[in-house]
Amino acid sequence: MSELTIDEQYAAELKQSDIDHHVPTAGAMTNHILSNLMVAYVKLTQVKWYVKGPQSLALRTAYQRLLDQNVRQFAELGELLLDENQKPSSTTAELTKYSMLEENGAFKYQSVDELVAATIKDFDTENLFVDRAIKLAEKENRPALAAWLVAYRGSNNRNIRELQAYLGNDARTGLDEEDEDDDD
């Protein structure tokens, strides 16, 4: 049996990744989370750099905490995927392809409240993937992955609540209305 070349190994990885994303696995869904973390890093940095107004110093401090947390979570999740014998996305192109968060250069010109609200919405969007990945990890009997994802979900919930409080809102204000409309 001959050894595959590096290009052949990578082509096989891409092919398997495509299969895993069409019939989701815990690893594929978690790769979306990893990708969202990368784009979230850029968006959190954008807010930190461009937030203005009387609360800008406090918000810069809060966003630096979110950035530090993001970097730690990105590194932990990549290592955890490797522990689970998965291949985390490792190029900017792959990470961008699998992220469901959207960037916009004009974002920096929004009001402070709009910047914070957008961050809240991003954490809530991330949770959609986390919830799916938890179910898949449990189904695939990946307890370490499921445990990390549950803790990450809790961290996102805390971030949502704290940012909502800045806006004078309860934790789920403005986030569950779409779900309630779907029930009618």
Image (spheres, grey):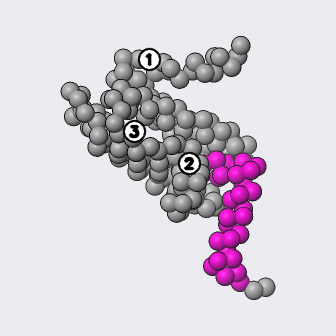
Secondary structure of the residue carrying tag 2 is loop
Which quarter of the rendering shows the N terminus? bottom right
- Which segment is the magenta one? 3-30
The residue mark sitting in front, 2 or 3, is 3
Judging depth in this view, the residue of 111 and 100 nearest the camera is: 111
What residue is at 67 percent from the left and 64 percent from the top?
14
Amino acid found under the numbered disc labelled 2: Ser
Give x and y (percent) for residue 25.
71, 49
Amino acid found under the numbered disc labelled 3: Phe
Judging depth in this view, the residue of 20 and 56 nearest the camera is: 56
Q: Does the magenta stretch include residue 90?
A: no
CA–CA distance between discs 3 and 1?
24 Å
What residue is at 70 percent from the left and 51 percent from the top?
21
Amino acid found under the numbered disc labelled 1: Asp
N-terminal of the pair, mark 3 or mark 1, is: 3
Which residue does the numbered mark 2 point to in the structure image? 99
Give x and y (percent) for residue 114.
39, 28
Secondary structure of the residue carrying tag 3 is helix
Which residue does the numbered mark 3 point to in the structure image? 107
Secondary structure of the residue carrying tag 1 is loop
Q: Is residue 16 magenta?
A: yes
Q: Do the residues labelled 3 and 1 touch (CB within 8 Å)?
A: no
Of all residues shown, which one is farthest toward the bottom? 2
Which residue does the numbered mark 1 point to in the structure image? 170
Relative to 33, is 8 above or below?
Answer: below
- Crowdedness near tag 2: few (<14), some (14–19) or many (≥20) residues, C-alpha within 10 Å: some
Which quarter of the rendering shows the C terminus? top right
- Crowdedness near tag 1: few (<14), some (14–19) or many (≥20) residues, C-alpha within 10 Å: some
